[in-house]
């Protein structure tokens, strides 16, 4: 029995939304009905693993979403590495002294005392970035100098960066690529000599095995060819965050401007 309606899961953050919207538009062009469901990491992965969702975009593998991959890996197939070089890091503004280059530098008292705040505004506690940020505060000894990583959401991170950059504050922020804020502000990634953050990930399209088996061969072939870059996601993310487009409109705008690349997926 062929699968005509596809349930596509995605994380409820704009860079994940646009990454998944490219997949949504491909499915629509192939004639599928698509239902998009979104939510936080710990909700979306179990729904894929149970088969309630057919597809999921995008999983950061092997490191970023490792804890969630372990929950579903026996029941899903990795369809395509949509893009490479997905990374986590902490950053400081470009105007912070050039000798602040490493997370270890934040643990130097003479450096820490220069910072306007040692409260580091993070995103959701369920995010891989947050789990690792909680760990690095301890492993680098930052907690001993009053550094504190607090959980929030993506909007809290964005608002904190915007407000503190405008004020000229010295601060540190958890950050990731792709993410539109990297295109807006001069943020300097800090080195991570202890390797708390994983090496660059691939951001992949996943499918539940049963759903994958029911999809037409043509659909499977085209989905397996989807490729774009971190820079492309940033462009789409900017279309959402700065231009007010919804995820699908942002994806369609990018796809229309890269028609030759997109046409090759359908060849």
Image (tube, helix red, strand yellow):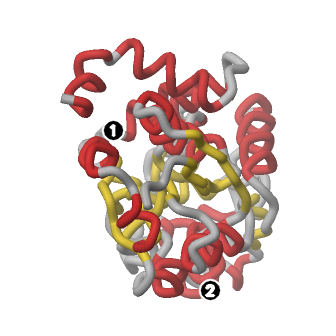
Q: Earlier in the sequence, mark 1 or mark 2?
A: 2
Quarter of the image containing the N terminus?
A: bottom left
Most foreground residue, 6 or 125: 6
Residue at image position (48%, 26%) is 235
User: In this orientation, does residue 83 appear?
Assistant: no
Instruction: For marks 1 and 2, give the CA distance.
Output: 33 Å
Residue at image position (52%, 52%) is 176
User: In this orientation, does residue 232 appear?
Assistant: yes
Q: Where is mark 2, residue-wise? A: 138
Quarter of the image containing the C terminus?
A: top left
Most foreground residue, 217 or 173: 217
Residue 236 position, x and y percent, is 52, 28
Q: Are marks 1 and 2 in contact (CB under 8 Å)?
A: no
Q: Secondary structure at mark 1?
A: loop
Most foreground residue, 172 or 55: 55
Task: Kindly indicate the quadrant of the structure image that contains residue 194.
Answer: bottom left
Outermost front residue: 1
At label 2, counting other C-alpha atoms closer than 10 Å, the crowd grade (few under 14, some 14-19, many 20 or more) is few
At label 1, counting other C-alpha atoms closer than 10 Å, the crowd grade (few under 14, some 14-19, many 20 or more) is some
Residue 167 vertical position relative to residue 156 in the rendered view, above or below: above
Residue at image position (39%, 55%) is 215
Labels 1, 2: front one: 1
Residue 118 position, x and y percent, is 75, 63
29 left or right of 161? Answer: left
Residue 132 position, x and y percent, is 56, 76
Q: Where is mark 1, residue-wise? A: 229
Q: Secondary structure at mark 2?
A: helix
Residue 36 position, x and y percent, is 66, 47
């Amino acid at each position: 029995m062929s699968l005509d309606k596809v349930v596509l899961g995605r994380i409820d953050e704009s860079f994940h939304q646009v990454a998944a919207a490219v997949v949504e538009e491909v499915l629509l062009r192939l004639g599928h009905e698509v239902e998009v469901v979104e939510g936080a990491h710990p909700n979306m992965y179990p729904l894929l693993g149970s088969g309630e969702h057919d597809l999921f975009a995008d999983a950061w593998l092997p490191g970023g979403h490792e804890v969630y991959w372990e929950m579903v890996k026996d029941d899903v197939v990795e369809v395509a590495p949509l893009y490479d070089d997905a990374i986590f890091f902490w950053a400081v503004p470009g105007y912070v002294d050039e000798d602040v280059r490493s997370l270890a530098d934040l643990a130097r008292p003479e450096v820490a005392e220069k910072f306007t705040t040692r409260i580091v505004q993070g995103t959701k506690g369920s995010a891989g970035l947050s789990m690792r940020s909680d760990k690095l505060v301890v492993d680098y000894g930052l907690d001993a100098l009053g550094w504190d990583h607090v959980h929030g959401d993506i909007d809290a991170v964005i608002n904190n960066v915007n407000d503190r950059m405008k004020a000229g504050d010295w601060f540190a922020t958890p950050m990731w690529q792709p993410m539109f804020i990297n295109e807006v502000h001069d943020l300097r990634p800090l080195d991570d000599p202890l390797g708390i953050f994983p090496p660059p990930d691939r951001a992949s399209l996943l499918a539940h095995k049963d759903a994958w088996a029911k999809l037409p061969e043509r659909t499977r072939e085209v989905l397996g060819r989807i490729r774009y870059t971190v820079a492309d996601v940033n462009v789409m993310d900017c279309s959402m965050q700065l231009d007010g487009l919804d995820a699908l409109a942002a994806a369609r705008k990018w796809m229309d401007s890269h028609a030759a690349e997109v046409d090759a997926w359908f060849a």
